[in-house]
């Protein structure tokens, strides 16, 4: 199974920036050193975006719905694997994270991708056109699987969440993309918790 994630305008714009800055550096004026520095910074930025795209794509090809539904992959004392909570949420913590841990009323900043049980991608923070990139949302205003699952993470952590329909969109589904009774799998990268400004 291959999951295709479109490279967004941000990546394209950053790549154009590399070309422009490289041309400037080639002019041989007294700003060459600064241009080289800027070019290196933009190249690093593009590499980081590409790595994130590849990370989400690769992870969801490995941790599929079928993988989560196989009892042989359940975590035990002598091996890693998926863990199930009382709600039916199953998850794998890919990176533990070292920062703060959100609570139900926290707003969080994340990158994510979501697929149906058959591997069809229905949403990704990297595929939102002009709004592509990390998003911020309150944990008490999303589907139960996210409210619960993201609270298990710490800032800097990465996880895969397996969400049966009863803790996702239920029998109503969501528009044309998520059918009724759909099981969903999400890759989540918790970047940081947004602290509200003091009133």
Image: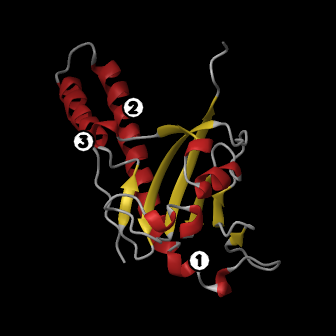
| SS assignment at label 1 | helix
Image position of 76 with respect to 30: above or below = below
Place of residue 87 in the rendered image (x, y in percent of width and height, measured from the top left): 70, 66
Of the two numbered discs 1 and 2 on the same chain, state the one appearing first in sequence: 2
Image position of 143 with respect to 75: above or below = above
Place of residue 17 in the rendered image (x, y in percent of width and height, measured from the top left): 25, 32
User: At 16% across and 22% down in the image, what residue appears?
Assistant: 27
Is label 2 or label 3 in front? 3
Q: Are marks 1 and 2 in contact (CB under 8 Å)?
A: no
Query: In this orientation, does residue 163 appear?
Result: no
Query: In this orientation, does residue 35 appear?
Result: yes
Q: CA distance from mark 2 to mark 3?
A: 15 Å
Residue at the spot of label 1: 68
Residue at the spot of label 2: 41
Residue 12's tag is: 3
| SS assignment at label 2 | helix
- Number of marks present in the image shown: 3
Image position of 92 with respect to 13: above or below = below
Quarter-of-image position of residue 23: top left
Of the two numbered discs 2 and 3 on the same chain, state the one appearing first in sequence: 3
């Amino acid at each position: 199974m291959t999951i295709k994630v479109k490279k967004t305008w941000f990546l394209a714009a950053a790549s154009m920036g590399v070309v422009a800055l490289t041309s400037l550096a080639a002019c041989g004026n007294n700003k060459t050193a600064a241009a080289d520095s800027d070019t290196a910074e933009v190249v690093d930025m593009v590499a980081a975006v590409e790595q994130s795209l590849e990370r989400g794509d690769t992870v969801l090809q490995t941790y599929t719905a079928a993988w989560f539904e196989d009892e042989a992959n359940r975590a035990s004392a002598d091996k890693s694997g998926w863990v199930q909570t009382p709600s039916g949420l199953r998850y794998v913590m890919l990176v533990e994270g070292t920062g703060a841990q959100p609570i139900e009323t926290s707003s969080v900043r994340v990158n994510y991708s979501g697929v149906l049980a058959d591997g069809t991608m229905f949403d990704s923070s990297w595929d939102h056109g002009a709004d592509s990139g990390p998003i911020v949302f309150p944990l008490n205003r999303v589907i139960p699987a996210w409210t619960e699952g993201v609270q298990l993470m710490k800032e800097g952590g990465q996880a895969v969440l397996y969400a049966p329909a009863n803790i996702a969109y239920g029998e109503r589904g969501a528009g044309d993309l998520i059918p009724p009774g759909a099981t969903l799998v999400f890759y989540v990268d918790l970047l940081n918790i947004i602290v509200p400004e003091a009133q």
